[in-house]
Image: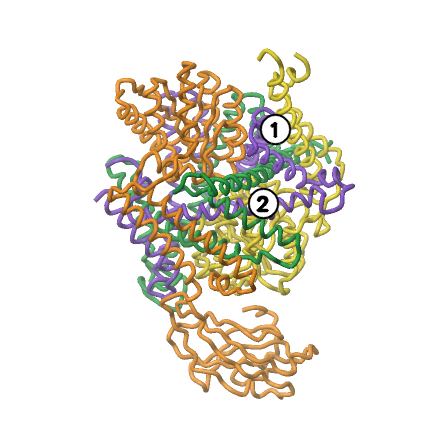
Chain colours: A green, B yellow, C purple, D orange
């Protein structure tokens, strides 16, 4: 055992223990760590986004633009925008970004909706096509598979998969009462869904225990110097 | 009252304590249970091994400290794997909490390779807000989305970035992700749209969700959670923190399984007890 | 005006982004690219606003001497200190050796990692106290959970090492993941995709307005 | 721009492509350079392909690589575009401007010097396209689905009430409230932990209105702890209107909806506190849940309350399924809110999704049959880029 003398590790270790103390019951140590965490993360996110996004993606290109230059140097002009080099047009996101702060001032707060509207518009567009391609068409395409593959085992798997997929889809069918053949299919569907949830349960257990292992490894190795 | 009654009235803090001890003990006294490399992990390794030497690989590290035990070992092994095969590596981070952590891991591994230089053989482009918007924007130029790297230098001035224009510069995307935005979004926005093959390493919580992508070929390989990381280490003949954690992981799983079974036995014994 | 203009903007931009997926021409792709670049910037402002909001809410709480207000002082001080140190250190603030990096490594990272590690304890007690096999469905869930949980780690193969390889827990786990669970996950994936697309359509049509928040 | 560093160390005399022909051509030159405008883009690239020098295949190192050179007229001057290693015979030039004429040639790099191809290719022009030809399948399915949704929204708005099956979970909610009434205890309703921009929160709040109507009818108190300010005000409205619709506005308790905290674990601590202190006889969880689902479901279970849950967050469903008496799975949550509110936009989306699911199942059945018969046309058509 070779306990560290690094102050930083001591601080981390104590904060880790403060949070673990919640397992016994809610207490002032936990509350202290929790509030410290919220404060530090809010501060860290703020400054991180300022230095790594607002500064290089907005402020610097704008400065260049006002000098008549751009990130692609071969054209001059404040408004000489092309793909990837938007020059002074970046004023627009700058203004929309600042408008977000009108939320803090009651009366003109509605103006922040303009910024919101722009963000939502972009994401709605990207997500709609992203889901349509990656999770809808591409997934349906991958489901079109030969049901007889030449070997009994893999054919069984392919048929099982197809039946499971169709029945699970039918479980989420709301235009008919689940009676008769549809009732049977949706019942089979729910069985497949349950196996899926069981697998999910197992993997979630794995994740959570891993996190605990990670913290214990930190405490044992970095702090106490064991192993 | 008897045994079942005793179990039923048990304060749950005893369960917490047992769990803690079961995870702690094998970390101090390892058992070294044998590992087996499963097909999704093999797919991950083979995808990287199949790349032509000297390729430039995009490694998207989308996680924060909450995923250290699962994703840091993967990042470490994958980065080492890529450097050993003389690949150039471009790293991006879309999670707020990630950049410092990822930088630390890259730094640690790069020290094992004295002939590899920052900006020449690998670069950390750091964090960018905007999730999917960043992914699509990179399709028109990686440096457009990341004008400066993690260190605050102009990213266009690095030699490695001379080789990188957009996604067509990469033969493979290695996505290490803990949730949103992450592997799912890379698949939706980049994999098919920009025709960029992908492999992924993810937290166990989200791993089952990615099996459909694995079956469809959208993902070439998958590392799920700490077990996936340990198998990857085994496939690469390393034995780092994930491998060392596997004994504790095993005991933890056994204990949870036992809890499920005992909990239900308690319930049945109560329903069979007369007078209730 | 206060509602119509934002709704109109969302509709136009959303539709435009969808069109840009199908139309590669520069008249569409360049503005679409610009919109994405802009979204990144506005989102970053959003995080800064988030910080300002936390500041305001907690100042309020301290002013009103709400319950636990001394903790809010801790919160405020740590927030302001983190921002101030980062601001002084400049754009390389996360480089090794910086004070901000110390805050990140020794405060932010360990606490963030520990918060969810707590769940390892709770998951065990929930398994014991709140995992009831009362129906066929729950029984299937339990069997799959047990097989996957044990099959995914080395101990599973140790327990079933005497069986032929296809019957060992590791292989059974792999089979469950690849076939039955995969079928169910794909159905959920497709259903969720339809949900997102339908929501997208409603937002673009201006009939989904919940994102604009309260009245006026 | 692969392997640029390596190849630039080729003989210094060959730096200017225009003089390259001066080297002694012991190695046969590459040939057959063809260009193709890269399809489906905004005129940003030209794809080049050539036949390797016959001496390249030997692997003896006679050819180190190739330089791709570009000029604006067939006579030069030639500028280097890119260089590649030996054995590679194609490259995409991404540095072009659209609608401009370019001429290309490919030059073999050998240890002795540069060996240019004997002919020049061009003029090559990069043009932009109006439609991405690789994405027809996505366009077709998206338009079809949107048409279905719009049709049903329109028909629901026109007053035709499309059929939506009753969701069993809704009966379970009513039963649970009944039980709470018998026991003289309250009902706890949790509308998820996300803000209003999450569609599940909206669904949870829609369902809250109907739940409040039932509790008003039974005269059973309801408690609604909320995470964010906007859902908080909407939740208040919902509960109020539930009591109003039940004809008992005077029974409404303004304290029933409480703003707690947006912080996950602080919120959990507060809600489990309510569970243990007030012992509500029914817990209803409807909305977006994350890691806290485990804690809520367990504490709730231990108090012996009837629990009904609903969420589309798949990771959390297992914990609800095993600890709750009834669980709405994924889309059932949206279906329940559409069923209860009867709102055209929700019902329309639901029915549209139903119809496209039938189409999907049809495609899967047909596609599997075709694939089994060895016909892969449908699968190929659906592949996109």
Residue A137, label in figure: none
Q: In this view, does C75 lie to the left or right of B61?
A: left
Q: In this view, does A115 lie to the left or right of A201?
A: left
**Where is D74 relative to C145, above or below?**
below
**Where is C168 relative to D221, above or below?**
below
| Whole-percent x, y for residue A74 in the image | 39, 69
Q: What residue sits right under mark 2 in the picture?
A: C180
Residue sitting nearer the eye, B51 or C144: C144
| Whole-percent x, y for residue B247 in the image | 71, 37
Q: Do tags 2 and 1 sit on the same chain?
A: yes
For the point 43% across and 27% down, the residue is D172
Sequence-first tag of 2 and 1:
1
Residue sitting nearer the eye, B82 or A164: A164
Asked whether residue D273 appears in the rendered view, the answer is yes
**Where is D294 relative to A78, above or below?**
above
- Label 1 CA crowd tier, 10 Å (few <14, some 14–19, many 20+): many
Residue sitting nearer the eye, A57 or C164: C164
- Label 2 CA crowd tier, 10 Å (few <14, some 14–19, many 20+): many
- Mark 2 or 1, closer to the camera: 2
Residue C124, label in figure: 1
Q: Is mark 1 on a helix, strand or loop?
A: helix
Q: Name the chain letter of the residue that bears numbered label 2.
A: C
Work out which quarter of the rendered image holds the N terminus of chain C and state it: top left
Q: Tell whether label 1 touches label 2 (CB within 8 Å).
A: no
The span from disc 2 to disc 1 (Cα, nearest Å) is 26 Å
């Amino acid at each position: 055992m070779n306990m560290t003398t690094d102050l930083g590790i001591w601080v981390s270790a104590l904060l880790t223990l403060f949070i673990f103390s919640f397992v016994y019951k809610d207490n002032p140590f936990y509350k202290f760590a929790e509030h410290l965490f919220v404060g530090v993360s809010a501060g860290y996110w703020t400054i991180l986004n300022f230095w790594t996004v607002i500064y290089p993606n907005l402020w610097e290109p704008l400065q260049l633009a006002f000098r008549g230059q751009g990130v692609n140097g071969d054209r001059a002009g404040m408004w000489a925008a092309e793909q990837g080099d938007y020059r002074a047009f970046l004023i627009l996101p700058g203004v929309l970004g600042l408008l977000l702060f009108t939320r803090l001032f009651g009366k003109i707060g509605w103006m922040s909706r303009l910024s919101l509207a722009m963000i939502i518009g972009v994401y709605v567009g990207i997500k709609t096509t992203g889901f349509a391609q990656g999770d809808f068409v591409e997934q349906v395409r991958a489901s079109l598979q030969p049901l007889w593959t030449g070997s009994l085992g893999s054919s069984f798997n392919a048929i099982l998969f197809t039946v499971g997929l169709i029945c699970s889809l039918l479980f989420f069918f709301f235009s008919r009462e689940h009676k008769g053949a549809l009732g049977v299919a949706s019942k089979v569907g729910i069985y497949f869904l349950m196996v899926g949830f069981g697998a999910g349960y197992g993997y979630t257990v794995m994740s959570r225990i891993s996190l605990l292992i990670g913290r214990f490894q930190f405490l044992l190795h970095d702090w106490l110097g064991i192993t | 009252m008897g045994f079942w009654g005793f179990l039923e009235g048990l304060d749950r803090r005893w369960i917490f304590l047992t769990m803690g001890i079961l995870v702690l003990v094998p970390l101090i006294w390892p058992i070294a249970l044998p590992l087996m490399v499963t097909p999704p992990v093999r797919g991950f390794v083979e995808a990287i091994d199949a790349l032509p030497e000297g390729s430039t690989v995009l490694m998207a590290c989308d996680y924060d400290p909450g995923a250290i035990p699962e994703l840091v070992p993967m990042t470490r092994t994958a980065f080492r794997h890529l450097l050993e095969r003389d690949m150039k590596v471009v790293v991006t981070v879309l999670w707020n909490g990630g950049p410092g952590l990822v930088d630390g891991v890259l730094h640690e591994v790069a020290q094992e390779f004295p002939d590899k230089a920052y900006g020449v053989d690998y670069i950390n482009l750091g964090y960018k807000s905007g999730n999917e918007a960043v992914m699509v924007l990179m399709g028109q130029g990686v440096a457009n989305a990341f004008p400066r790297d993690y260190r605050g230098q102009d990213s266009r001035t690095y030699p490695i970035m001379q080789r990188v224009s957009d996604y067509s510069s990469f033969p493979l995307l290695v996505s290490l992700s803990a949730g949103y935005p992450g592997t799912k979004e890379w698949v939706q926005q980049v994999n098919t749209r920009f025709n960029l093959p992908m492999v992924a390493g993810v937290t166990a919580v989200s791993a089952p969700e990615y099996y459909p992508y694995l079956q469809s070929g959208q993902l070439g390989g998958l590392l799920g959670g700490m077990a996936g990381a340990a198998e990857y280490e085994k496939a690469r003949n390393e034995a780092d923190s994930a491998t060392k954690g596997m004994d504790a992981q095993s005991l933890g799983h056994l204990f949870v399984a036992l809890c499920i079974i005992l909990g239900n036995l308690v319930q049945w014994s109560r329903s069979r007890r007369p007078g209730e | 005006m206060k509602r119509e203009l934002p709704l109109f903007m969302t509709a136009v931009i959303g539709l435009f982004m969808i069109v840009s997926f199908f139309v590669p021409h520069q008249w569409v792709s360049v503005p679409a690219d610009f919109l994405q670049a802009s979204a990144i910037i506005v989102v970053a402002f959003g995080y800064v606003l988030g910080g300002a909001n936390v500041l305001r809410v907690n100042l309020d709480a301290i002013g009103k001497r709400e319950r636990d207000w001394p903790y809010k002082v801790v919160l405020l001080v740590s927030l302001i200190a983190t921002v101030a140190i980062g601001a002084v250190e400049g754009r390389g603030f996360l480089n090794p050796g910086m004070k901000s990096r110390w805050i990140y490594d020794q405060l932010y990272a360990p606490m963030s990692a520990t918060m969810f590690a707590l769940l390892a304890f709770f998951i065990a007690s929930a398994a014991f106290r709140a995992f009831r096999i009362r129906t066929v469905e729950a029984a299937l869930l339990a069997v799959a959970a047990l097989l996957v949980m044990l099959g995914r780690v080395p101990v599973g193969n140790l327990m079933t090492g005497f069986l032929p390889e296809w019957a060992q827990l590791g292989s059974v786990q792999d089979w469950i993941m690849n076939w039955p669970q995969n079928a169910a996950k794909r159905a959920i994936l497709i259903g969720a995709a339809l949900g997102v697309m339908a929501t997208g359509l409603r937002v673009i049509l201006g009939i989904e307005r919940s994102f604009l928040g309260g009245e006026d | 721009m692969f392997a640029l560093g390596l190849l630039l160390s080729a003989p210094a005399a060959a730096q200017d492509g225009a003089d390259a022909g001066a080297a002694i051509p012991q190695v046969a030159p590459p040939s057959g350079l063809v260009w193709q405008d890269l399809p489906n883009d905004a005129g940003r690239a030209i794809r080049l392909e050539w036949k390797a020098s016959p001496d390249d295949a030997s692997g003896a190192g006679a050819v180190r690589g190739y330089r791709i050179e570009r000029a604006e007229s067939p006579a030069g001057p030639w500028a280097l575009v890119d260089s590649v290693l030996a054995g590679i015979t194609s490259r995409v030039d991404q540095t072009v401007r659209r609608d401009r004429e370019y001429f290309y040639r490919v030059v073999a790099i050998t240890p002795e010097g540069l060996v240019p191809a004997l002919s020049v290719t061009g003029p090559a022009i990069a043009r932009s396209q109006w439609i991405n030809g690789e994405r027809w399948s996505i366009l077709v399915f998206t338009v079809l689905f949107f048409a279905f949704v719009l049709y049903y929204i329109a028909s629901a708005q026109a007053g035709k009430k499309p059929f939506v099956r009753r969701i069993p979970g809704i009966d379970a909610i009513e039963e649970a409230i009944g039980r709470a009434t018998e026991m003289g205890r309250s009902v706890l309703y949790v509308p998820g932990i996300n803000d209003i921009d999450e569609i599940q929160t909206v669904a949870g709040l829609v369902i809250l209105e109907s739940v409040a109507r039932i509790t008003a009818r039974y005269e059973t108190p309801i408690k609604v702890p909320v995470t964010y300010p906007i859902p908080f005000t909407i939740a208040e409205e919902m509960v109020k209107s539930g009591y109003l619709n039940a004809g008992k506005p005077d029974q409404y308790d303004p304290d029933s909806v409480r703003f707690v905290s947006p912080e996950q674990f602080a919120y959990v601590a507060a809600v489990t506190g309510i569970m243990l202190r007030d012992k509500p006889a029914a817990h209803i969880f409807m909305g977006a849940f994350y890691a806290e689902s485990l804690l809520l479901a367990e504490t709730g279970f231990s108090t012996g309350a009837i629990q009904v849950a609903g969420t589309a967050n798949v990771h959390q469903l297992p914990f609800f399924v095993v600890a709750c008496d009834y669980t709405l799975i994924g889309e059932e949550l949206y279906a329940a809110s559409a069923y209860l509110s009867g709102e055209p936009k929700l019902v329309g989306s639901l029915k549209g999704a139903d119809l496209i699911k039938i189409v999907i199942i049809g495609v899967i059945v047909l596609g599997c049959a075709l694939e089994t018969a060895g016909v892969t046309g449908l699968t190929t058509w659906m592949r996109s880029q």
